[in-house]
Image (spheres, grey):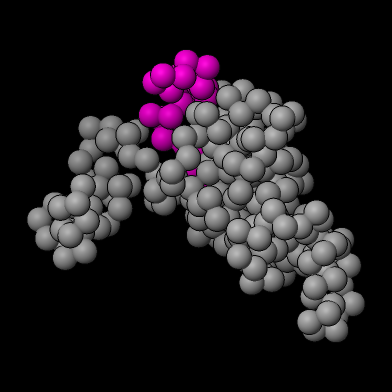
């Protein structure tokens, strides 16, 4: 591993291929290597085991940037006493939405994610901080809508670039196979599909993950939606 780091930095020998990321290398290797590559949408999975942290698994799967724990802090929900992190239910999908919105807002307020535990109500306290610094009269509900708009805008960008629902998943190595040493930590592909659909409907999108014109308009993204999706059927086929 230490040698690989040097070779990646110098783009020397195998490092030249590893530098392009595990997805590209897996496609180059072929032979179903993509099923093993630990990535989502080309971004490598960070140090969280998705089978044992299944709210985080959902956050990884639906992330517009891929498996990014800074864009989705859903692992926070996995450690709540009312959540079974090895067997989360569709009703828990809203927790992934909430942590993703909080992350989007913290990025916009330019706050370090390590401050997330400081706030009792990020939306309300964020509005007050923004008022004190800028003089803007902003409410918690406005910030909540802003966070949802940010996430939807990123999703619309992906849709315009050709995103398909099949991309909102995890590598097969993490699905239907129990975690070694923890037989209760198993995430079926069927369950992940249910969670993704629940996440999408919680956001007001279609179960497959398409953003409708009505939702886009409600978030102030109507013109952008129309620019890339003259008809909803066109979006279903990719743009």
In magenta segment, residue 203? no
Instruction: Give whichever of 8, 21 is nearer the camera.
Output: 8
Residue at point 37%, 40% (across, down): 38
Q: Which residues are magenta?
A: 164-189
- 67 left or right of 81 in image: left
Percent x, y of residue 33: 27, 35
Say above or below: 138 vs 95. below
Say above or below: 209 vs 153. above
Instruction: Give whichever of 181, 151 is nearer the camera.
Output: 181
Residue at point 65%, 25% (across, down): 84
What secondary structure prevails in the magenta region? loop
Q: Residue furthest left?
A: 13
Percent x, y of residue 63: 56, 49
Say above or below: 47 vs 217. above
Percent x, y of residue 35: 34, 33
Q: Is residue 163 visible?
A: no
Residue at point 66%, 52% (across, down): 100
Q: Is residue 195 visible?
A: yes
In magenta segment, residue 182? yes
Percent x, y of residue 105: 70, 63
Asked which quadrant contains residue 56, the reply is top right
Instruction: Give whichever of 87, 112 is nearer the camera.
Output: 112
Q: Residue furthest top?
A: 183
- 176 left or right of 85 in image: left
| Number of disc labels | 0
Residue at point 66%, 60% (across, down): 115
């Amino acid at each position: 591993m230490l040698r690989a780091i040097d070779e990646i930095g110098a783009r020397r020998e195998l490092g030249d291929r590893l530098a392009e990321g595990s997805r590209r290398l897996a496609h180059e290797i072929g032979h179903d290597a993509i099923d093993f590559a630990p990535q989502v949408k080309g971004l490598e999975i960070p140090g969280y085991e998705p089978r044992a942290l299944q709210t985080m698994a959902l956050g990884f799967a639906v992330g517009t940037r891929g498996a990014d724990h800074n864009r989705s802090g859903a692992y926070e929900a996995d450690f709540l006493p009312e959540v079974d992190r090895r067997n989360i239910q569709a009703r828990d999908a809203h927790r992934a939405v909430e942590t993703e919105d909080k992350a989007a807002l913290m990025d916009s307020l330019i706050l370090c994610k390590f401050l997330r535990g400081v706030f009792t109500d990020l939306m309300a306290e964020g509005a007050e901080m923004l008022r004190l610094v800028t003089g803007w009269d902003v409410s918690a509900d406005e910030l909540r809508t802003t966070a949802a708009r940010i996430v939807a805008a990123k999703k619309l960008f992906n849709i315009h670039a050709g995103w398909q629902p099949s991309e909102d998943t995890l590598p097969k190595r993490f699905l239907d196979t129990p975690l070694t040493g923890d037989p209760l930590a198993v995430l079926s592909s069927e369950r992940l599909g249910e969670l993704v659909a629940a996440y999408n409907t919680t956001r007001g999108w279609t179960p497959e993950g398409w953003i409708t014109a009505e939702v886009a308009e409600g978030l102030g993204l109507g013109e952008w939606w129309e620019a890339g999706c003259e008809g909803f059927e066109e979006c279903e086929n990719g743009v």
